[in-house]
Amino acid sequence: MHDIRVGTEDVFKRQIELASRNFALFKEHGVRAFNVMGAIGSGKTLLILRLAERLKEKGLRVGAIAGDVAGDDDYQKFVAAGLVAANLNTGDDCHLDAHRVGHALESFPLGDVDVLFIENVGNLVCPADFPLGTEGDLVVISVTEGDDMVRKHPKMFAQTDVLAVNKVDLASFVGVDPMVLVDDYRRLNPHGAIALTDARSGRGVDELLTALGL
Ligand SMILES: Nc1nc2c(ncn2[C@@H]2O[C@H](COP(=O)(O)OP(=O)(O)OP(=O)(O)O)[C@@H](O)[C@H]2O)c(=O)[nH]1
Ligand SMILES: [Zn+2]
Ligand SMILES: [Zn+2]
């Protein structure tokens, strides 16, 4: 959990400035960037890989930045799938921030990608406080986390553009009705778009692409 006790307002103000800088950089290179957030193991990486398959079929070049506390597991998956990829370890931080992402972008070949997915650290709390400068936010939850996940994290869901309710193939096994999550999200965020996905089979991925405006 992050704990910024001194000058919190200044820290957030600085982060917003840095996010604007990242936003300008994406625009300059014509890159459509998305901040992919969600709980640990909700399916962020697999969904990015599925989205990338579809985007490649459309002739678009896809990049991904793997944000994790440690290791390069997700990064290796992106590389194996042929994505332009970078690994971003946060050490002991539970979220990415615009500052870290800005540094990662210094060496990232933005000219080689049309769409960039930035996979945030698995966490439904802290990432909500740190804009990265992306044009869109996607939050991925899985039915296996329970049907109260949206109600428990109102800040994250109220401000996110697109919700993917993932692992719908497992809904009946865990006794969760995906529509409960959908209804909670609609109440919190009437303007948000929603896709029900099964990233393993690829079901719902086209709807998610549409929801992201891709
Ligand atoms: N049955 C099923 N399994 C899924 C689905 N999506 C992802 N998985 C599996 O769930 C596990 C976690 O998926 P990831 O894509 O690694 O999840 P993540 O959100 O990137 O995880 P972290 O980066 O560790 O937070 C993997 O074993 C996936 O194969 C789905 O829709 N249905
Ligand atoms: Zn944090
Ligand atoms: Zn992942």
Image (cartoon, rainbow, N blue to C red):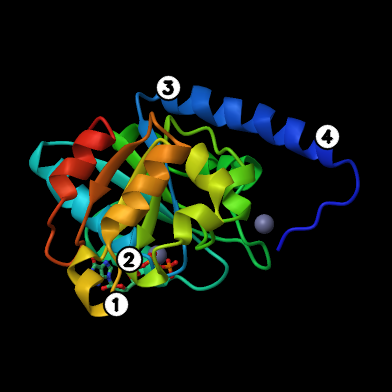
Q: Is residue 131 visible to the viewer in this orientation of the structure? A: yes
Residue under numbered circle 4: 10
Q: Amino acid at mark 4?
A: Asp
Tell me the amino acid under the disc marked 2.
Answer: Val
Q: Residue under label 3, please give it.
A: 27
* Depicted 193 relative to depicted 74: above or below: above
**Pointer 2 and pointer 1: residues touching (CB < 8 Å)?**
yes
| Residue 179 percent coordinates (x, y) | 28, 53
Q: Quadrant of residue 109?
A: top left
Residue at x 37%, y 65% (from the top left corner) = 42
Could you tell me which quadrant the N terminus lies in? bottom right
Cα distance in 3D space between marks 4 and 3: 26 Å
| Mark closest to the chain's N terminus, 1 or 4 | 4
Q: Residue furthest left?
A: 57
Q: Where does label 2 land, which residue?
A: 143
The answer to whether marks 4 and 3 mark residues whose Cβ atoms lie closer than 8 Å is: no
- Image location of residue 174, percent across then percent down: 29, 77
Circle nearer the viewer, 2 or 3: 2
Dot 4: element: helix
Q: Nearer the viewer, residue 68 or 143?
A: 143
Is the CB–ligand 1 distance for label 2 below 8 Å? no
Relative depth, front residue between 184 and 74: 184
